[in-house]
Image: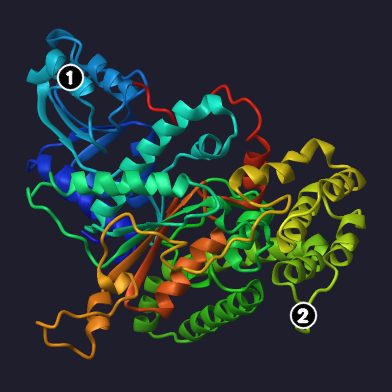
């Protein structure tokens, strides 16, 4: 069976593991099963396979475990669920008694470690109906070929809210995130050296210590019962406040720009063509999207029309031949032409929508942002007065409050914090009193809104301490034992095939995702896999930051006990 996504990459690794540990484990020739999923596993499977792939694995129907369903007592059911009380209770309801069982038998696969109390509950209630009960250790979503998320956006509030009453919730989320990160490493078959950014806060340090302990425990009790030593890969854990600038800048690369400026939800882009409303999913199965998503918008706008002309000329050349064989070839190619042109129309619409927004308000704003972020202007001259650079943006009535707040933040970041008096004046003059917490609450992320020490981003052992003994290649030492024969390519040998796994507490941006691919391309021997609690856009981040000092009554993340 052809892989459901690109042959390489995290999505395919996850699918192959699910295929081997779940479907191959319970497959029986000629037997069809019903599959039950909860909210998380629905997202997980949707990220790495299609319904056609499930059909090939003997799944005839996929159902939501939370919903009422008609019994199908002649069929067996495959439960792929998270080990939570809610999901387990739904399973137990399906097998309340032998006369009321919804299905003939059950195969249960948990995404992660199932607590003893839940396991014992299952064992006591309906063990005779269960053919399999296993944990497969995949508790994350492969968002792209080199990007993963834990799908816990509420972790941002718990990790950065100043409310001391959230301490218990924060501890629970830290434990859960550590468990999930371990499943990322296990899926990649890595036992990495764990490092963390020691500033601006201590979240990264605490999470790194938890991950290191859980990695140690995991590799003591893995399926092979062998202790796996540290591999040449490393895991970097970082607090969101480590780089505030990239989160608020307007990006001009295609993917980051589109998600910032346009209302794209669940990777679905809505557009009009020929007077009709249409939808397109921006996904890696679209090879054109993969090719252009990280390119500058100007390059994209040049490239797509060229591709459309190429296809049009190829089609016309084929149509000009009247032989039977030429007509046969044309008929075969028509769906291919149609598919290619449809993709190009989607991306051309997407690029043009971005440019319309850009020309309307963003173009002049970008120059100001770049000057503030870099500290130099387009001619390379040092910016002497950041306030003078900022003022035209604040006085421009065409810019909305969100863009003005982003510019104010860049100004504050550029001078490493401002005075309370200056901040009050800025907020009052721009009339953003109701949104002022979008600025002030950055201090809870350890970002200096009022003067503090600058953050040094050098990757040295003081700023990026280890939680464990790592291979010498990662601590800057090229030392070789005197008993070994030294090799000229020793460092390259050890680096070959290694991975750099990055985890950011509190969300990653599309520009940071792009960097993972660019660094991997530049350093062929090391693949960067980047992940976080969730994916950010500037608007979503500012909304989350605004909420940090507010009470949060309903949080969906905490697993029910």
Of the image marks 2 and 1, the number of the one nearer the N terminus: 1
| Position in image of residue 28 (x %, y %) | 7, 40
Q: Which residue is mark 1?
A: 122
Residue 418 pos. (x, y %): 78, 54
Viewer-closest of 245 and 210: 210
Work out whether residue 47 can be spotted: yes
| Residue ID at (46%, 39%) | 152
> What SS does tag 2 mark?
loop
Circle 1 — which element?
Answer: helix
**Residue at 65% over, 55% down:** 260
Q: Which residue is mark 2?
A: 378
Q: Of 14 and 415, which appears nearest the observer?
A: 415
> Is residue 533 shown to the viewer in this render?
no
**Residue 100 located left or right of residue 277:** left
Q: Residues within 10 Å of mark 2 (few under 14, many from 20)?
A: few
Give residue 274's position: percent from left, percent from top.
67, 58
Q: Residue at x 10, y 46 (%)?
A: 223
Q: Residue at x 46, y 83 (%)?
A: 318
Q: CA distance from mark 2 to mark 1?
A: 66 Å
């Amino acid at each position: 069976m052809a892989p459901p996504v690109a042959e390489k990459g995290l999505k395919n690794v996850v699918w192959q593991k699910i295929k081997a540990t779940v479907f191959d484990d319970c497959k029986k020739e000629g037997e069809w099963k019903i599959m039950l999923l909860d909210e998380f596993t629905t997202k997980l499977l949707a990220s790495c396979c299609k319904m056609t792939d499930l059909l090939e694995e003997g799944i005839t129907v996929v159902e939501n475990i939370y919903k009422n369903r008609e019994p199908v007592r002649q069929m067996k059911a495959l439960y792929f669920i998270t080990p939570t009380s809610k999901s387990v209770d739904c399973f137990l309801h399906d097998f309340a008694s032998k006369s009321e069982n919804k299905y003939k038998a059950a195969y249960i696969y948990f995404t992660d470690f199932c607590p003893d109390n839940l396991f014992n509950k299952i064992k006591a209630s309906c063990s005779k109906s269960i053919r399999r009960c296993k944990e497969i250790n995949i508790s994350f979503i492969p968002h792209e070929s080199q990007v993963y998320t834990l799908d816990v956006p509420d972790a941002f509030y718990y990790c950065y809210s100043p409310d001391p009453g959230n301490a218990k919730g924060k501890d629970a989320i830290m434990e859960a995130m550590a468990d999930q990160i371990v499943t990322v490493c296990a899926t990649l078959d890595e036992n990495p050296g764990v490092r963390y950014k020691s500033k601006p806060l201590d979240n990264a340090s605490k999470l790194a210590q938890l991950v290191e302990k859980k990695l140690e425990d995991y590799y003591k009790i893995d399926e092979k019962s062998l202790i796996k030593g540290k591999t040449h890969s490393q895991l970097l854990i970082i607090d969101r406040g480590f780089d505030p600038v990239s989160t608020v800048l307007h990006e001009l690369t295609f993917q980051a720009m589109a998600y910032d400026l346009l209302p794209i939800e669940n990777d679905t882009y809505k557009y009009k063509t020929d007077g009709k409303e249409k939808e397109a999913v921006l996904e890696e199965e679209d090879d054109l999207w993969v090719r252009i998503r990280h390119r500058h918008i100007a390059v994209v706008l040049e490239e797509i029309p060229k591709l459309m002309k190429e296809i049009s000329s190829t089609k016309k050349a084929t149509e000009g031949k009247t032989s039977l064989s030429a007509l046969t070839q044309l008929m075969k190619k028509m769906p291919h032409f149609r598919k290619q042109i449809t993709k190009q129309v989607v991306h051309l619409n997407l690029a043009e929508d971005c440019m319309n927004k850009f020309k309307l308000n963003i173009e002049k704003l970008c120059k100001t942002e770049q000057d503030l972020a870099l500290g130099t202007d387009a001619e390379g001259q040092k910016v002497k007065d950041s306030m003078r650079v900022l003022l035209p943006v604040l006085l421009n009535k065409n810019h909305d409050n969100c863009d003005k707040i982003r510019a104010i933040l860049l100004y504050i970041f550029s001078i490493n914090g401002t005075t309370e008096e200056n901040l009050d004046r800025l907020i009052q003059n721009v009339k953003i009193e109701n949104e002022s917490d979008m600025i002030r609450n950055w201090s809870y992320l350890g970002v200096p809104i009022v003067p503090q020490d600058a953050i040094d981003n050098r990757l040295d052992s003081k700023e990026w301490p280890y939680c464990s003994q790592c291979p010498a290649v990662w601590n800057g030492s090229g030392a070789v034992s005197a008993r070994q024969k030294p090799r000229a390519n020793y460092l390259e040998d050890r680096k070959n095939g290694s991975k750099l796994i990055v985890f950011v507490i509190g969300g990653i941006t599309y520009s940071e995702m792009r960097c993972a691919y660019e660094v991997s391309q530049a350093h062929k021997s090391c693949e960067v896999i980047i992940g976080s609690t969730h994916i950010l856009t500037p608007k979503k981040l500012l909304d989350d930051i605004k909420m940090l000092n507010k009470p949060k009554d309903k949080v969906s993340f905490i697993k029910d006990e």
